[in-house]
Image: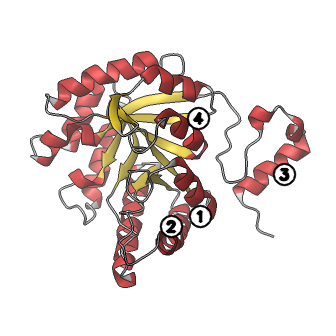
Amino acid sequence: MNVNRRQFITSAAMASGLAFCPTEFAFPIDKITRLSKPKVVVGMNAYSLNAPLIARAMTYEDLLVYCAANGIDAVDLTGYYFLSYPIVPDDEEIYRIKRKAFLLRVDICGTGIKNDFTIPDKEQRKKEFQLVKNWILVAEKIGAPCLRIFTGNTPPDAYSRKEMLDWIVNDLKECADFAGQHGVILAVQNHNDFLKTADQVEELMKRVNSDWLGLMLNIGGFQSSDDPYKEIEQVLPYAVNWQIKESVYVNKVETATDLFKIADIIKRSTYRGFLPIETVGKDDPKEKFRSYHLEVKEAMKEITG
């Protein structure tokens, strides 16, 4: 009989008496089980330095040096900035960057691509699956625990949301199975596209129900809510990685993120993992990120490790 990880944890907990522990240790099967106090590592999403990276004024090796020099402990190396993207980089480039990160003591906390599982044409969606599959192998080689992916765009008029959700669920199940074979967790980002609300995120996670699929919790992605912090707290049990942004949307109005409120939400959870920051805007991206990084670290100082 095959027993998956969640079943094993449940059986072990019952055998050891954990089934009678306080409710803080009880989680539905579709949520991530972490029997511990919260602990985070504040890092960077490479998109924060989009301008110099896209202009080729900065390489990923330069970025790693910047991180090391500024006390940035982890970085999500977005796939777009590899010169060959969407074609995967060769092994020499992957391993050179991996070695540089190791020597500088900067964790590679993820990588990411732009895919779309809402394309109506099934053959085109197969190409999107192949893109995910190819970059799962890159994540495995470079040592990234997560690959950030997307569901896709909002439904066209010709198709119902239910139809498109069925496509997405089927594709994600297949991708998650492949990811599990390579030890990489797929992190689906809520990007105010097909996934706009916390309820929609929960519905997707419950339907796919894979140990190898989690949420890239984009705090700026809940743009139609009157209380984005409530939505963030609702989906936090599914999070395997984050995007901390300078703004959230309150009643559809862009509003400065209350970092201490985010910190309080995490403190009430059992989240343990990375907390990458993504900054945007017209100011010098290096200076802007350096400043905001310090603000986030100050807000999270009680739970950083």
Q: Cα distance, mark 2 to mark 3? A: 27 Å
Q: CA distance from mark 1 to mark 3?
A: 22 Å
Q: Which residue is mark 1?
A: 208
Of residue 68 and residue 126, the one placed in the foreground of this image is 126
Tell us which disc is closer to us: 4 or 3.
4
| Mark before the other along the chain sequence, 1 or 4 | 1
Could you say where residue 285 lies in the image, as x and y percent from the top left?
18, 31
How many angstroms separate mark 1 from mark 4 (CA)?
Answer: 21 Å
Structural crowding at the residue carrying mark 3, measured as other residues with C-alpha within 10 Å and reported as few (<14), some (14–19) or many (≥20)? some
Q: Does residue 146 lie above or below 302 as drawn?
A: below
Q: Which residue is mark 4?
A: 271
Q: Position of residue 153 (x, y in %)?
A: 35, 63
Q: Secondary structure at mark 1?
A: helix
When asked about the image quadrant of residue 275, the answer is: top left
Task: Specify the amino acid type for callout 1.
Answer: Val
Dot 2: element:
helix
**Tag on residue 11?**
3
Using the rendered view, name the quadrant where residue 19 is placed: top right
**Please, which colouring scheme is shown?**
secondary structure
Evaluate whether residue 69 shows in this view: no
Q: Residues within 10 Å of mark 1 (few under 14, many from 20)?
A: many
Report x, y in % for residue 175: 49, 68
Of mark 4 and mark 3, the one earlier in the sequence is 3
Q: Specify the amino acid type for callout 2.
A: Leu
Compute the Cα span from label 2 to label 1: 7 Å
Mark-to-mark CA distance, 4 and 3 = 22 Å
Q: Hey, what amino acid is under mark 3?
A: Ser
Q: Residue tagged by mark 2?
A: 172
Q: Secondary structure at mark 4?
A: loop
Q: Is residue 80 left or right of residue 195?
A: left
Tag 1 and tag 4, C-beta contact below 8 Å: no
